[in-house]
Amino acid sequence: MTLHLLHTADWQIGKGFGQIPGDDGAALRNQRLETVSALAELAREEAVDAVLVAGDVFDAQSVGDRTIRQVFERLRAFPGPWVLLPGNHDAAVAESVWDRAEHLGAVPEHVHLATAPAPVRLDEAGLAVLPGPLQRRHEPADVTAWFDEAEIPAGYTPVGLAHGSVTGFLPAEADAANPIAHDRATTAGLAYLALGDWHGTLQVNERTWYAGTPETDRFTSTNPGHALLVTLPDDGGAPTVATRATTRYRWHSLSQTLHESADVTALADRLAALGEPAPDQVVDLTLHGALTLDDKAALDETIESWRGRLRHLRVDDTELTTRATEADLAALNGAGFVATAAERLRQGAEAGEGADATALEMLVAAYRRHGEG
């Protein structure tokens, strides 16, 4: 019969988001649990025959008992079979997070923990899942090699489940540990090979896919934030794979050069163009250029306004300088030693001394505030 699967991976529940502190980081951590609920709802709506989770369900072995219970409770919303595979973050080591889950009695009957290299038979669906669990963080050998010799019960459709790097396929920056043969689906006669570890949705060949993380978690991922709906035809033909967007938070890495007030306005327009809802946007912003004190003040107001609207805004302005205009310096005439200090700092700034430029900005701004007061 035709089979319908939901393929997902790299939930990394408990991820710390150390680079995003406070309430923003907490919101991102909590959303990963909410995304599990969304996946259960998607599986229910699509009436899939099974959900395959290709590793890194948890971000670390040290997640708390409450977090473990929360994950498995959310799987109850879809009563069909779930097959969960240990990845490099939650490998099936001695006293693993998987052992703790079983000791807690947290694992529902319809959830299968694929902690050993042995077929997981889903009798109602006629599906034989061949898992390649990682039993330590880094495996030098291909843990899917045993698929080629696996005995598949008559009438069962074989599907592989693994977590690692397809040899010679992923970009150079991908982790080279935990190798997987690029032709494993062919050599093992698999209907489909569901992979995890690469955080973006990616097709390896017609029967092999990375699902990617369902909730975006970094600025550098390519095509994250999806789950895959996989249809396996009963004639053994190639699967049909459809992506479904699952992410809530969208991460953006932006760079902007600023020299005049129009550039500050353009930056505000660019932030507005990221889309709604604004509280679901996470932004890393790098600024370059040089602004007058007035334009820098306008920029500061713009940045603070957007900090209140976005989920998180991280700003790197180390390459942005400010300059005092002739009008700013003229206002210091007659100010005695202040004018003398400003002139010396101006000369240093023009000679490329960054510290002098910063000091000049602070001096003029302080004098302005004093004058306004």
Image (tube, rainbow, N blue to C red):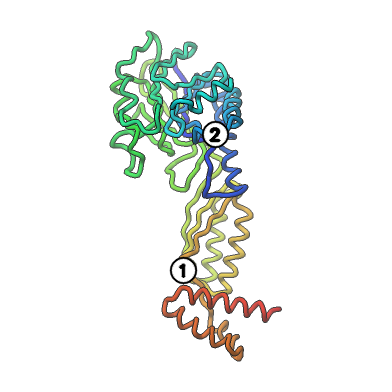
Residue 159, quarter of the rendered image: top left
Q: In which quadrant of the rendered image does the N terminus lie?
A: top left
On screen, residue 115 above or below 316: above
| Residue under label 2 | 63
- Horizontal side of residue 361 vs 165, given as left or right: right
Q: Residue at 45%, 80% (x, y): give it.
A: 348
Label 1 crowding class (10 Å Cα cut-off): few <14, some 14-19, many 20+? some
On screen, residue 344 above or below 39: below
Q: Between 189 and 358, which is closer to the camera in this rendering?
A: 358
Which type of secondary structure does the marked residue at label 1 adopt? strand
Amino acid type indicated by mark 2: Val
| Residue under label 1 | 289
Q: Is residue 296 visible?
A: yes
Q: Do the residues labelled 2 and 1 touch (CB within 8 Å)?
A: no
Q: Residue at 58%, 85% (x, y): give it.
A: 338
Amino acid type indicated by mark 1: Gly
Outermost residue on the front side: it is 94
On screen, residue 223 above or below 69: below
On screen, residue 93 above or below 256: above
Which type of secondary structure does the marked residue at label 2 adopt? loop
Residue 341 point in image, percent of width and height: 54, 84
Residue 297 point in image, percent of width and height: 59, 70
